[in-house]
Image (cartoon, rainbow, N blue to C red):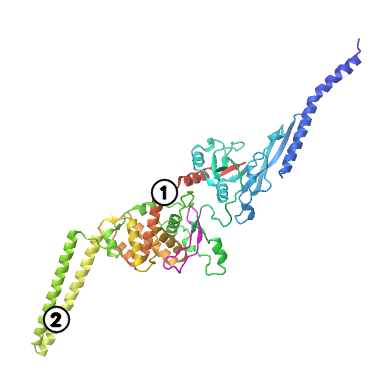
Amino acid sequence: MPSAVDVITYVGVPLAVVGVMPVLYTSSSALLTQYRVRRTVRKNYLSITTRVGLLAGVVEVDLPRFMIHSLPRDDPAYWQQNPQPSSIKGGTWTVLNWQKVAVGKASYRLQHSDELRQPQAEVNMADLITFLLDRGASPSAHGLHLLRLMGLQTPPTTPLLTYNSKPVLVVATPDESEGRLSLRLQCDDAFTERSPDSLPPYWLRLSSHHLKSPTELFPPVRLFLTTEGLDQLKLEPSDARKSTTTEFKQPDFEHLLPTDSDVEGGLDVWFACGAVAVCARSEDGLVSRYSIPSRMHQFSKRDTIPHDILVLLGMLKAELTPLQAERERLKRDAEVRRIAASHQVNMNRQRELQTMNPAERTRAQAQDSMALLHRMTEDRARRTAEELEKKADALLSPRVGVKVVAGAAVSWLRESGHIPQDGRPLSTIAAAIVHAMIFDSELASSIASVLDAWLGWMDLVMTDVHFDIIEHSKPAFCYAAILLNQIAEYEHRGNTHPVARDLDECQRVWGKVYLG
């Protein structure tokens, strides 16, 4: 019969070894996981802190959490892919180059190395969208509309931006997003279509134009408008480089900057409206952050100028009805008869004076001079009354739309030599007017003054005062009419694109998002 020592040796020891094996396995598994985690992190150039619970078989990992911003546009790294992107889950944002600021750390408890994930980076959604658009991405109308309607319930993998018809920015599963929107980058292809000389998102470009003479060519400029109005203006990069050897200089645009005035309209508002209208790029819907006020849209669509006022200004030819033509004929005939009768009276009077003695002739000639002066005064008063009556009738004539006014304005400007007879369309002339407002502050002020006065009687009746304003600044009125017509055309074409509205609304609602 085996002794107690034999039982302990052959039974107890193996049982004890078998009982320790799970602990040894758990500990070794934890150490192996820690090794694999450190190796993975080291390959992705991250600094971490790890702790191992040998008995629990858990590895605790502390990873830094970053807030990221896009680099300056003139930094070469802005246009390059990151040569060492992270391969860890949640690190898709490292594909591109960013400015990084550590804002804390995220702790994870892992049992297996494949559970490791990189914390999502916090980024301003407007900054992210603008950066990707500048690199060549395009907005996805369907995805942005879904995000605007569904918010956090938007299905994962819904594309918000695309590049070459492939998703670039998609909605991600909201892991650890704390109620914020979670997004993911999918940059399989390198962005290669754009460069520092490309037009940035939300900027406008005015090509070279001339207004009064082909020799007075304005250089191409770029404009950036915020929701308040003009914010930045600069020459095209190629022309800016040439400006050191030519007469082109960076334009002074102080007169076009927004003011704090509560007055409706103003030079800054009219310039911003005109710039957006003439620089519209409806193919992508992203024109500018500035929206033309609804009041200006209403103004551009109203019939505000009486037809016969344009006739009085010499901008349209009078088209008389048969009755009006008959009245004009009778008036001309009466005037001819009056002149003939007056001539006959003068001839008879001359013969009568010849029969008088010198003293009588002198008195008679003095009386004739007084009578002539009286008739001239009466004729002047009659003509003034007729002009006032004609103006009053013209002010009550049917009103016409801005398109008719703009067409008449172009014809008058060409006939009077203010613009060349080159057959340019209205849209091109409108762009030249906006361009001229940058370089000619006096012209810009006169156009804005006319538009402000014009806006003032939009809901009222045009009066003699308004007519005098137009008559004394007819070229500025013509330029203003062409610019207002372009604003009306912008609204008619529907350039307030739904993609732009959805994108702006998403950026406004979400603000900060997580990218991972």
Point 37% across, 56% down: residue: 485
Task: Give the camera-side residue of 193 and 220.
Answer: 193
Quick check: is 364 in the magenta stretch?
A: no
Q: Do the residues bearing badges 2 and 1 touch, measured as CB atoms within 8 Å?
A: no
Quick check: is 207 in the magenta stretch?
A: yes
Percent of width and height locating residue 447 = 39, 63
Image quadrant where residue 39 sits: top right
Using the numbered discs, state the Cα–Cα distance from disc 2 to disc 1 in whole angstroms: 71 Å
Residue 6 position (above or below residue 134)? above
Amino acid residing under circle 1 = Gly
| Residue bearing mark 2 | 368
Residue reaching furthest bottom? 358
Percent of width and height locating residue 397 = 25, 57
| Residue bearing mark 1 | 494
Label 1: state its secondary structure.
Answer: loop
Point 48% across, 47% down: residue: 500
Point 16% across, 63% down: residue: 327
Residue 443 position (above or below residue 151)? below
| Sequence-earlier tag: 2 or 1 | 2
- Inspect this view and state whether residue 54 appears: no
Image quadrant where residue 263 sits: bottom left
Task: Give the camera-side residue of 427 and 481.
Answer: 427
- In the displayed structure image, the side of residue 74 where residue 324 appears, left or right: left
Q: Residues within 10 Å of mark 2 (few under 14, many from 20)?
A: some
Q: Main secondary structure of the magenta part?
A: loop
- In the displayed structure image, the side of residue 101 where residue 31 appears, left or right: right
Span shown in magenta: 206-229
